[in-house]
Image: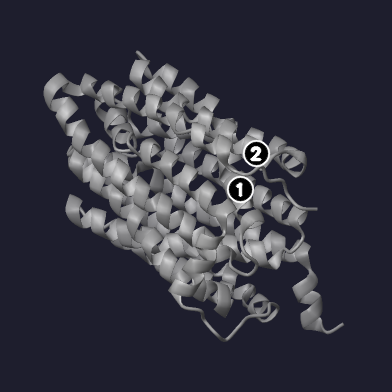
Amino acid sequence: MSTNDERCSDNNKISREIMLRQSLASLADNFSAPYMGYYLAALSGSGVLQGILQFSVNSMPTTAQVFLGPVIDRVGRYILFLLTTSVAASILWIIISLIIDPVALVGVYTLRAVVVGLAGLAFTSFIGVFFVDANLRSRVLSLVTLLSQATALLAFLIVAFIINPSIDQLRIIFIFSGVISLAGSLIWIRLLYIDNCMERSQVIPSVWRVFKEIIRNKTFIKFDLAFSGYIFVMSFAWPYFPVAQRNLYKMSVAELAILNILGTLSTMIFQYILMKIIPRASLKKLIIISRLGFLIPPFAYAFSPNIEMIYLSNILVGPFSAIGNVVITLYVYEVSVKNLQASHLAFLNFSQGIAAAIGSILGGVLMDRFVASYGVDGLRIGFIISTILRGVMTIPFIKTEDIRIRR
């Protein structure tokens, strides 16, 4: 066996490098990304602008994914693509730190979301293609998620109990995120040889040909419609959360970090348990359980008299987040047409991204009307509507195919 063959077959070493890289990326992003909506709310209290932010970061990245998904599938230069996009995303954090105009902030943050979205698509497709064994793939994906949550927890702890930044100091945090992210991106250089380990076609199919293949996959389309419908109603409340945190519950950045700490810790604990459950469980049933769990956040924000109850709700929703973090991607892997994993993921991301974009901007417009009519308590009306709609849109998942991981 050649040296290159040995390197390509060393799954343990490759897994460790991937986990280190994703952990650093998570550390960098979670110093800054969870506070972007809060930061925008400090620059502008407009519900419409919050809706536009959610619209942009959901629709633009997924549109780009649809066109580049087939290219990623066939070219197969996953690591080179990940290196390029990761460096670009790091630099954009530094640029964001210099922006104080809310409209410009939305534009540049959207650009970064596009870059990160393409990197995420390439990463999940790489995991699906490189780790052929389904159980190994599930384990790697679960461990990557678990370690990413651990570093996210570290970031939240530092923000809450050591830094406790003001709005102006958040800009310094954005620069710090860019530096850490850039350091993590360089790990991809050590893994560039992996691109030579995988077979790839020099022929890139047209978007239309790939689209027809996906449309013929009835199992996938049924799931895509159910998932996108749920995301549409789920996203209705997204513009409400940062505004409610700042204006209804008067949270500081430190309190918001504590909220993230509790949710991440809860998710991490269950993520470890989930690794043992997935190989023998129905992915469909896990997804339904996860969707039902996401009724908790809007319900809590609608009726909680204080932030302690909001903290509790974030703890309770953790296990359901853990399921969604892994099982949805695994479901798509299992039902995808061979060698078109990235294209299926891109299609799912596109359809749910458009649904989220429309839902969030609709929610933002209605939020301004509720607040104008009822004051800040008008936010609770939006949360009640979101809770009801999430419950209703869980029903279509019952009609999706029951899928288990193939051994």
Q: Which mark is residue 271?
A: 2
Task: Please tell me which residue is depicted at 65% across the width and 33% down the height of the picture.
Answer: 269
* Disc 2, SS: helix
Task: Please tell me which residue is depicted at 74% across the width and 56% down the height of the picture.
Answer: 134
Q: Which mark is residue 145?
A: 1
Q: Is residue 25 left or right of 104 when viewed as pictured?
A: right
Above or below residue 259? Residue 227 is below
Percent of width and height locating residue 362: 25, 40
Percent of width and height locating residue 284: 63, 40
Image quadrant in which you'd find residue 339:
bottom right
Assess whether mark 1 and mark 2 are in contact (beta carbons under 8 angstroms).
Answer: yes
Label 2 is placed on what type of residue? Gln
Image quadrant in which you'd find residue 288:
top right
Percent of width and height locating residue 12: 77, 62
* Disc 1, SS: helix
Percent of width and height locating residue 401: 62, 44
Task: Please tell me which residue is depicted at 48% across the width and 42% down the height of the picture.
Answer: 226
Label 1 is placed on what type of residue? Thr
Taking depth in this image into account, of 80 and 400 the one nearest to the observer is: 400
